[in-house]
């Protein structure tokens, strides 16, 4: 396994300065995969360089850094593929949209290997169908249209059962942003009880609304990969559907959860900004900070509720796609606390039961501001910005 590495260094403008640095790297028998430069923010006429290469081991990474030290300034290992031996460095993160292609075969659970308690675990035909659908995600590359799926009648009936149950509750339980977008999805994206909308059509719609796009995914990604995608306004979406024997239950994300729960909110500009804010904070974050950000994601994008006038409504996709919990979360049974990221980040939560605690956001803008403040308090040696024109991450001043 190669270690995908990024090293940063600065040089003072002089003829041949970069050449010397590249020669030092070459002396380690390494070929670069990318090099980026920009005028330094810290000293006039200095230039920052970011070089990427695939190292064979941690030792090689350290050697390259060492050999640059005498001839460059501020030599820093920015990313080393999450390698533990280089724990002092910043974990690797995607810098360009195409870097997301490397997540495709890193899923935690795959359709072919369902847990024993999954409703479809003993259904060979269901497992084969899952494998057929997840193959699309496995081979998908940035920029391609998401292939069309001809859903079977059984699959459509499952979707229809979920669709009818949930849409009956949206007027009284969903936040106004969700309710505002839903009719547009019916008009433009084929939402309705008699067909399962295609990801490609939905992705194009979202792109027009907020710049968010969908990317097919085989199953659960690691928190780091999943959150990193949000920095690019990319939402990883499953394309398969839950087992027909239990239409109102799924132990994992499926196309009902994505399309009915997540998609309507990603069409809202404030919510899109909020989600990307979590994504940007996750780039190169430490494992502990990823855990904190994943918890914040859990209590907002998945299980968030918000104040709207004198009422409380659901905006989390886990709530909006669950018939039982949507009812429960607005009842007087769970505990409700204000959305304060520092506290939210420490909250323990069950994954399979209804949540005992929910956090109320005052608005998506307010929540975004609070998350930004929280992100600034995390210890990361640099800050990042997304450049939508080049679909890439720019690294700002080393802190
Ligand atoms: N992966 N495909 C996928 N979908 C999710 O909703 C998802 C994920 N990985 C992690 C995750 N959600 C969250 O629970 C947080 O850990 C970010
Ligand atoms: Fe989800």
Image (spheres, rainbow, N blue to C red):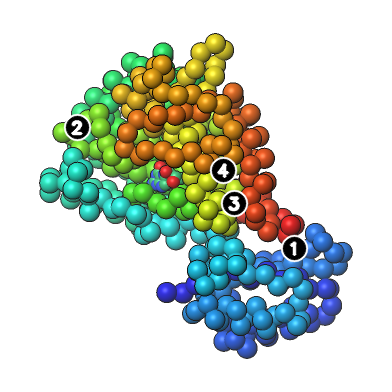
Residue 136 location (% of width, % of height)? 32, 52
Separation of residues labelled 4 and 1 (CA atoms)? 26 Å
> Mark 1 to mark 2: distance in Å?
55 Å
What residue would you read off at disc 2?
246
Please report contact status of discs 1 and 2: CB closer than 8 Å, yes or no: no
Mark 1 surroundings within 10 Å by alpha-carbon count, few (fewer than 14), some (14 through 19), many (20 or more):
few
Is the residue under label 3 in contact with that under label 4 (CB below 8 Å)? Answer: no
Q: Earlier in the sequence, mark 1 or mark 3?
A: 1
Q: Nearer the viewer, residue 40 or 345?
A: 345
Residue labelled with disc 3: 391
Q: Nearer the viewer, residue 261 or 139?
A: 261
Question: Which callout, 4 or 1, points at the residue further toward the start of the chain?
Answer: 1
Q: Position of residue 355 (x, y in %)?
A: 39, 31
Q: Nearer the viewer, mark 4 or mark 3?
A: 4
Q: CA distance from mark 3 to mark 2?
A: 40 Å
Q: Earlier in the sequence, mark 1 or mark 2?
A: 1
Q: Residues within 10 Å of mark 2 (few under 14, many from 20)?
A: few
Q: Earlier in the sequence, mark 3 or mark 2?
A: 2
N-terminal label among 2 and 4: 2
State the residue position of label 1.
Answer: 38
Quadrant in which residue 34 is drawn: bottom right
Nearest-to-viewer mark from 3 and 2: 2
Q: Position of residue 367 (x, y in %)?
A: 60, 31
Task: Tell me how far mark 4 sits from mark 3, CA to CA.
Answer: 17 Å
Q: Residue at x 48, y 34 (%)?
A: 299
Q: Which mark is residue 278?
A: 4
């Amino acid at each position: 396994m190669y270690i995908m590495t990024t090293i940063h260094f600065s040089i003072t403008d002089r003829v041949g300065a970069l050449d010397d640095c590249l020669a030092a790297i070459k002396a380690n028998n390494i070929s670069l995969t990318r090099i980026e430069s920009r005028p330094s923010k810290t000293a006039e006429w200095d230039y920052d360089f970011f070089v990427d290469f695939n190292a064979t081991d941690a030792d090689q990474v350290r050697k390259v850094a060492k050999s640059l030290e005498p001839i460059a300034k501020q030599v820093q290992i920015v990313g080393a593929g999450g390698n533990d031996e280089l724990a002092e460095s910043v974990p690797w993160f995607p810098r360009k949209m195409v870097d997301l292609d490397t997540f495709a075969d890193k899923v935690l659970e795959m359709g072919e290997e369902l847990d024993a308690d999954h409703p479809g675990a003993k259904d060979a035909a269901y497992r084969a169908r899952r494998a057929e659908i997840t193959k699309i995600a496995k081979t998908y590359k940035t920029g391609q249209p998401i292939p069309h799926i001809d859903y079977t009648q059984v699959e459509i009936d499952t979707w229809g059962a979920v669709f009818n149950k949930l849409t009956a509750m949206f007027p009284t339980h969903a936040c106004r942003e969700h309710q505002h977008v839903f009719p547009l999805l019916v008009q433009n994206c084929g939402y309705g009880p008699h067909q399962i909308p295609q990801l490609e059509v939905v992705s194009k719609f979202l792109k027009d609304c907020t710049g968010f796009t969908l990317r097919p995914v085989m199953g659960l990604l690691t928190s780091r990969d999943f959150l990193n995608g949000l920095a690019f306004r990319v939402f990883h979406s499953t394309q398969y559907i839950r087992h027909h024997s239990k239409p109102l239950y799924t132990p994992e994300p499926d196309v009902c959860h994505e399309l009915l729960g997540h998609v309507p909110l990603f069409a809202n500009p404030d919510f899109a900004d909020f989600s990307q804010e979590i994504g940007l904070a996750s780039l190169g974050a430490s494992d502990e900070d990823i855990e904190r950000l994943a918890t914040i994601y859990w209590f907002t994008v998945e299980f968030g509720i918000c104040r709207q006038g004198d009422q409380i409504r659901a905006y989390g996709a886990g709530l909006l796609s669950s018939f039982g919990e949507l009812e429960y979360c607005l009842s007087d049974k769970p505990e409700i606390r204000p959305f304060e990221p520092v506290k939210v980040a420490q909250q323990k939560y069950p994954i399979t039961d209804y949540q005992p605690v929910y956090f109320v956001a005052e608005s998506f803008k307010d929540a975004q501001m609070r998350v930004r403040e929280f992100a600034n308090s995390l210890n990361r040696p640099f800050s990042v910005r997304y450049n939508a024109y080049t679909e890439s991450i720019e690294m700002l001043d080393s802190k």
